[in-house]
Image: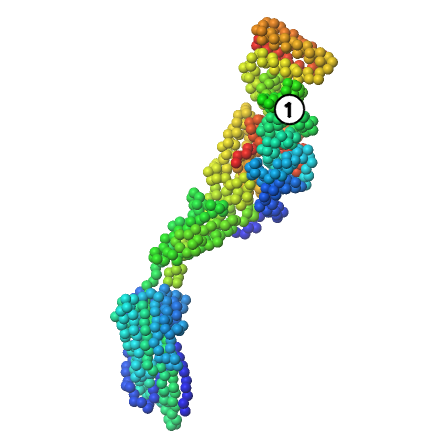
Amino acid sequence: MKRRRGFIVAFLSALAAIACRDNVFAPIGPGTPSFDVWVPPPGEGGVVCTGYLEGRAFGGPSGRIDYGHLCETSLDIVSPPLQAVFEDGHTGPYDITVEFSQPVAHLVVLPIDIWHCGADPGSITAYAPSGAHVTLPFMADPSDCGVLHDEYGYAYSYGNGTLPQSLFIDGLDSVRRVVITPTNEMSWESTVFYYSGQVLTLEGFVGTTYLLSFREPITTASVTIVRAQGPNPGGSFTSYPGENQLTLQATVAPAEAAPTTQWEVIDDPDDAVTTYEPNGVDPAFGPTVVAIVPPQDASRWASVPHKGTLNQKSLALRVTAGVDASGTIVRSAPAYVRQDEIDTMREEYIELGVGRGVPGRGEFGAHDGNSGDYGLAVVNQAFDGMFFALQLEWQPFTLTMGSLYRNPVHNRYHVGPTGGSGPVSSSWHQYGCAADLPTGLPVFPTQDELAKAQRYWNALHDAAVDVGFTVEARDPDPTKPDKSFSSADHVHVEIKCR
Amino acid sequence: MPMSAYRLVSPLVLILAVAVAATARGQTPDDAATMLASSSFRTRAAGVALLNTIPASALPPAAPPALMSLLEREATGQVQYNEITADGDESWQEYIVDLSAAVLRLRDARSLRGLALLGIETSRSAQEFVASLGAAALPALNEAWRAKPTVRPDVILTWGSALAVTGNSALSPADRLAVLAHLESATELYSLAVAGAAGRARLVILAPILNQIGDTTSDVIVRARLQRVSTDLRTQLALTPPVDVLSQLRAWLGGICLDARGPRNGDCTALQQLLENAAARLRAGEGGAARATLTAARQRVETARRAGTFSGVEAVTLSLDLEYLLGKI
């Protein structure tokens, strides 16, 4: 009785169990098993990479394949058009040509299968990039050939399969291409003799996978951010076009990995501000790129506490660079791009769309009349000069400065219950060009005190007008119907300074 | 960090802020001109602020008349106000300042009424623009004087500027008399403003009376301001030749005597003749005769004061100046 059965051997541990040989043919002769079925590529160090599938080879410790560890080198099965270095008795034997994406050294080829005793084990021809080549025969372990296998007293057979050996490609410094010529028999009959007199003949097919192992140097990559900054002094920035371009630069080792540098620019997770992140970098990869800070969410200012800290106001981004080191991304230490105090203040003008524009960085400084939320104020020398003139005019008395500079957020949200100059204002207070000069009116004035404050108000109003200030009108404020006087507690003076 | 931890403003304020911000953005100049007609003063303010960012020459055609009309309507209480603002909110004040500046930069005589009724409260530039219109400005200033007590100090200052205008827009003698008459009548009640006007018009003859008012006022600020102005005027007075001082005094008397009738007219006529005579004597270099005439004039002023045909301030102003001249001649 004949039965056909095809099988593919996948694990070396199964090889011995299925090795068989009929007793019709004389034993080829016993041999002595004397080798490891798999040997690592010679040498030390690096990563042992193994390829048998079309594509990137896999790393991992000796004898094991870690499919999560991609090596740099990949395989291209030139012919026949297969997804794996594999052939079987149905379609083979045929030659397989494999090309490596880059030259490899210490190449060891392991056929995983059982070959027929006495068959030609085939060979491999390896080619160096130079075209030099060597052809080396595969070796098989014949020690089981002709060995009697007694199956617990009810059957017996003679071993007729050999285990192929690992073949080290010697004689070439590096290999770019190999042509595998397999064993010439990929199917044969095996006979099992039963003591009952029955004889069973089986036809077996082998399917051979070739593992191609080599050592690949570990790519020791490193990446360091050497520049992550905006265009303004100190590397600061704003979201204003022209000031919103961040320059990111990294040094990469090895240098040839630099073009693969990738960048991550995210909101600084450690501050209390939500900074909208750039939409990628340009170019997408490389050691030197730019990132554009997009327009930000102006509504954030309404919830910033008064006066708040820079940590609650300044836009900040965390920048990390990375390079691909043999499948593993090596990341740099993070760098931070953060607005300084001046640009944080200027960002208020940008985001709130204050109508008279964004003061330049040089316009900020310390000022006695600062009633804003920062340590700095917009300083306007023309206003200060006129104020000095008014002070001279006001002698022998000294003017009191109630409120001069207000940053836009303070002006909008923090002055009074609904805001100093209101949400539509482009108040000159925001440019250091307006001041509120108190009249000394008490919170709960008597009639005499109110009259006195109004006299002061009138005198100061007229003096301020005389020296050239623009001054609030004397008329009652129609939005405060319970008040009979414009603002008896202070005189608002300003100049048009932009 | 949770954003709610920082939420210190009411949702209503947030909604308002976002809504107004949305309104302010993306507006065209034409939109801004339309916004001037809004019933919301915040919207009107946003429209004015936007128009102020555009060069006057680039304003849409509808904007200048709309701005001038708005200022005039604001000045005459014809604009609706639905909003109430809190203490400390300066939106309205800054809006009026902005609106006045927006109209002023048009340099358009059609803006006269609005500027006279309101704009001149906000800047010397507005006052001087109105004054530069010369006689044409006087009816508007007179209307403002009558209609709005709050604008009177600024009307006075503008009158002072009008007196200083030279060239084609200079006031005629008759108009000058009318303005001087206004200033004279305001001297006691609006002494600070009159002092300012005197400074602008170089009315050195007001130095003595302003100094005296300053000396007798109880308010330290007003006193100091009057003393400062009068000191400046005194300095100018000292540098002014007596004949010119006398000329100014005659003009001032003309203002006092404008439309004078009855006994007052008699005193006025007599004084005017005496001062004219004194001036002639001075010009002729006859100091002694001039002194005698000025002495007679001083006696006549005192008589008029006692008779009640001249008010105390009128009489004191004249007397102090006559004494000064007598001391100088």
Q: Quadrant of residue B148?
A: top right
Identify the coloring: rainbow
Compared to residue B17, the image places residue A368 above or below, namely above
Residue A303: x and y in percent read 56, 47
Q: Is residue B306 visible?
A: no
Q: Say which residue label 1 marks.
A: B135
How many C-alpha atoms fall within 10 Å of the one at disc 1: few (<14), some, or many (≥20)? some
Residue lying at the far left in this picture: please name it: A171
Q: Is residue A113 left or right of residue A404?
A: left
Q: Residue at x 60, y 29 (%)?
A: B126
Q: Which secondary structure lies at badge 1?
A: helix
Compared to residue A370, the image places residue B134 above or below, namely above
Q: Residue at x 39, y 73 (%)?
A: A81
A369 or B38, which lies in front? B38
Residue A25: x and y in percent read 31, 89
The quadrant in which the C terminus of chain B is found is: top right
Circle 1: residue type: Ala
Compared to residue A487, the image places residue B173 above or below, namely above
